[in-house]
Image (spheres, rainbow, N blue to C red):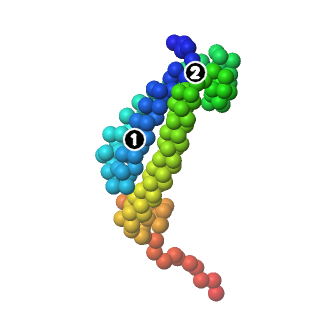
């Protein structure tokens, strides 16, 4: 489906990215409270929003290319300089601001995920006990066993 202008999708893109920002703020709260069940419910919605935003960006890029500009984000500024108006410029600037917010939320949420994973790994290692450090040492039953004193030969 061809669009008349590279600016035709901006309002809808802005709504989608705004919804993504709101979802990522909720995700952040769930990460802080370690609510794995709540996080699992957000994943399908995040995926759907990301797919819809990608499709709109693809359509905008196609329209930029058809208008003789770079068929990428870099083509928007030159297009706005010759084909945009104040409303389109405002929508684009607001979209860029929302994208920056989403990027920062994604960075912080990634740090929270890594922190939670490190905490979980430490807890698992604690639960495994000292035998966890003796990787590769197994008893007859196939279970990990604590490493005892080594058998060293004394050469005299």
Please report the residue visible at 56 percent of the width from the left and 78 percent of the height from the top: 152
Q: Quadrant of residue 20?
A: top left
Residue occupying the point 47% across, 47% down? 105
Position of residue 130 measured from the top left corner of the image (x, y, whole percent): 42, 70
Q: Secondary structure at mark 2?
A: helix
Q: Is residue 151 above or below residue 57?
A: below
Q: Position of residue 81 (x, y in %)?
A: 66, 26
The residue indicated by pointer 1 is 22
Q: Nearer the viewer, residue 126 or 102?
A: 102
Whether residue 125 sits left or right of residue 56 in the image: it is left
Q: Give the CA separation, mark 1 to mark 2.
A: 26 Å
Q: Which numbered mark, 1 or 2, is in the foreground of this view? A: 2
**Of 123 and 137, which appears nearest the observer?**
123
**Compared to 92, does 132 lie above or below?**
below
Q: Which residue is mark 2?
A: 6
Residue found 65% across the figure and 19% down from its top = 65
The answer to whether any part of residue 54 appears in the image is no
Q: Residues within 10 Å of mark 2 (few under 14, many from 20)?
A: many
Relative to residue 109, is residue 3 depicted above or below? above
How many numbered marks does the figure carry? 2
Q: Residue visible at 47% across and 27% down?
A: 11
Q: Where in the figure is residue 107, as x and y percent of width and height?
A: 51, 49
Residue closer to the observer: 118 or 49: 49
Within 10 Å of disc 1 (Cα), the crowding (few <14, some 14-19, many 20+) is: some
């Amino acid at each position: 489906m061809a669009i008349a202008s590279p600016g035709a999708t901006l309002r809808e893109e802005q709504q989608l990215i705004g919804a993504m920002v709101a979802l990522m703020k909720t995700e952040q709260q769930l990460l802080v409270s370690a609510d794995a069940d709540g996080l699992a419910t957000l994943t399908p919605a995040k995926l759907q929003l990301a797919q819809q935003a990608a499709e709109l960006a693809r359509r905008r890029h196609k329209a930029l290319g058809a208008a003789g500009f770079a068929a990428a984000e870099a083509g928007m500024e030159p297009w706005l300089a010759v084909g945009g108006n104040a409303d389109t410029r405002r929508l684009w600037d607001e979209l860029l601001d929302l994208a920056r917010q989403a990027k920062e939320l994604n960075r912080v949420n990634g740090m929270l995920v890594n922190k939670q994973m490190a905490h979980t790994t430490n807890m698992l290692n604690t639960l495994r006990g000292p035998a966890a450090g003796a990787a590769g040492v197994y008893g007859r039953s196939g279970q990990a066993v604590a490493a005892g004193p080594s058998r060293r030969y004394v050469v005299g």
